[in-house]
Image (tube, rainbow, N blue to C red):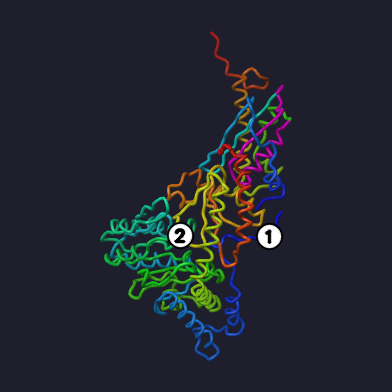
Amino acid sequence: MNERSVYLDHAATTPTDPRVLEAMLPYFTGEYGNPSSLYRHAAGARQALDDARRTVAEVLGARPTEVIFSGCGTESDNLAIRGVAMARRHEGNHIITTPIEHAAVLHTCEQLESAYGYRVTYLPVDATGMVDPDDVGRAITSGTVLVSIMYANNEVGTIEPIAEISRITRARGVPLHTDAVQAAGSLDLDVERLGVDLLSISGHKFYAPKGVGALYVRRGTPLLPAQTGGGQERGLRAGTENVPYIVGMARALEIASAEREAEAIRLGALRDRLLAGLLATIPDAQVTGHPTQRLPNSASLAFTGLEGEALLLRLDMEGVQASTGSACAAQEEGPSHVLTALGLDQVAARGSLRLTLGRATNDDDIDHVLRVLPPIVETLRAMSPLYAS
Amino acid sequence: MYSDIVLEHFTNPRNVGTMEDPDGYGKVGSPVCGDLMEVYLRIAEGRITDIKFRTFGCGAAIASSSMASEMIKGRTLDEANALTDDKVAEELGGLPEAKMHCSNLAASAIQAAIADYYERHPDAQGAPRAEQAPSG
C-alpha cells in the first residue's frame, strides 16, 4: 500500500494555511475580549473585527456595512434565501433557483415551499450545467421575491453567467443571490461586476478553518434575521462574534485574492494535464460539466461500468483522496442530483469521480494519479456485469 | 468504515468471472440504485461445485459477493439457499448498518441462481414440488 498522500478533494475542504493560523492565534488568549465590551481590554478584538470586515469588503468590492459574518456557507445561504423571502413575504411568494444548487439552497427553498407556501421554479440547465439567462427572464413574475443561482457548481465546476443574469434581475427589480462558496478563492468576487445583491462564502473552502463564513448583502436589500439576540452584525446575525475565525477568514480571503490569478493558471495547467492523461488512457470516460467555463482546479469525470464509492476506496488505498457523486447507503440511494439535472445517464452517473486540486497540488501528484487510476478502473470494470471488455 | 476482512475481499475478490452454460444463473439489483450482481453456478449431485460472480457496486457490495461465493462453494443447495445477509456480514467482521443491503443483495443473487436451477431442473433433488392438483 502506498504511503504517499495526494489530497484532491479541495472542493470538500482545505487545510488551514499556516499564515491564516498565525493571524488567528493572538485572538484566543491575548486579545480575547468581546468586541461589544466597552473597556480598553476589548479594543483589540473590536479593531480586529473591523479590520477583518474591511478586508473582506475590499475583496468583494463592497462597503464594510454590507458584510455579515456567519458560521459557515450553509448559514449564509439560509440567511440570504429565507431572510429575503420572509422579508418580502407581503410582496410575493415566488422564488427562482436551479436544480444544481448545493443542498443548503435546495433544502431551504424546499422548506419555504412546504412550510410557508412559497412557489419555487427550478430553471433548466443544459448538459454542461449552464443556465440560460433568458430562462431567468422568462421565469420572473410579478410575485418573484428572489432569484438564487450559484456562481460555480461544486460537483462539476461549471461557472454560471452571473453578470448576464444580474442584468436581467436588476432590470426586473428582483434581488439576486449567488452561492459563491465554491467560487471564492478561484474566481473574482467583485459584487459590482457580478451585479448581485447577496453573495455567500465559506472559509474552509479557501484555506481558513471550518466554522466561519460570510454573506454580502447589498445596501437596501430587505432581510429578516434568522438568528436574533444581542444585535451584532447590525441586528442581522446575533451572537458574539467569533473574532479569531473571522480574522482568519479575512486573512485567507486576502491571500486567495492576491494569489488567485497565478494559482488559476498553475492549477488549470495541472488539471488540464490530469484530464488529458486520463482521457488518453481510460476508454469510455467523459468529462462532466462545462469544458471551458469551469473552475480551474476542478476535474470531474464519469466512467461507465463501475461504481463511484468502490473507485474512491481503491484510490484511498493508493493514497489518493477524492470524491464521487454516487451515494450507496440505505438512507441515501441515488446518483447525484447535479449529474441527474445535467441529463447524464443514471448508470454512468454512478461511475462519477471528482478531483479538485489545491494549493499543495504539484506535478508529482498528477503523475501519481495518472499512474494509479487507469488500472483501478480496469480492475473494477473487469468484475462488472455492466462493462464488456 | 470497513473491517480488514471487508477490505481484503474488496481488493482480492474471490471467484470473479463468468461461466459457459451455468447450471444456475441469477441477476439481482438495480444499476440506477448503484448495485447489480450476477451469479453463475455449477451444480452436481445437489452441491455447488463452482461459482462465479460479477458485481457493479460499492466496496461492501463487492466484498459481500466475494464472501458469499466462498461461503457456498461446495455446499448443498439447501445450505446455500439458507444464506442470509446477517451471516455474510458476520463473516465479513461486520458491515455498517447503511451497507447491510449489500450483503442482502449477495444472498439474494445466490438464491436467484438456485431458483433458476430448479426452474430448469424441476426433477432435481431438493426442487420445490408443484402444488398437487385436486383429483377427480
Q: Which residue is drawn at 43% across and 76% down?
A: A67
| The label number, if any, that marks residue A339 in the structure image | none
Q: Quadrant of the N terminus of chain A?
A: bottom right
Q: Position of residue A303 (x, y in %)?
A: 54, 46
Looking at the image, the residue that sits furthest to the top is B136
Q: Position of residue A187 (x, y in %)?
A: 45, 67
* Nearest the eye: A137 or A226: A137
In magenta stretch: residue A335: no
Is A50 on the left or on the right of B122, as rendered?
left
Q: What element carries label 1?
A: loop
Residue flagged by tag 2: what amino acid is it? Arg
Q: Which residue is drawn at 45% across and 81% down?
A: A54
Q: Residue at x 67, y 45 (%)?
A: B10
Location of residue A323 by image quarter:
bottom right
* Nearest the eye: A286 or A250: A286
Are discs 1 and 2 less than 8 Å apart at CB? no
In which chain is the residue bearing label 1?
A
Q: In the rendered structure, which segment of residues is drawn in magenta?
A: B44-73
The residue labelled by disc 1 is: A4
Q: In this view, does A306 lie above or below A268?
A: above
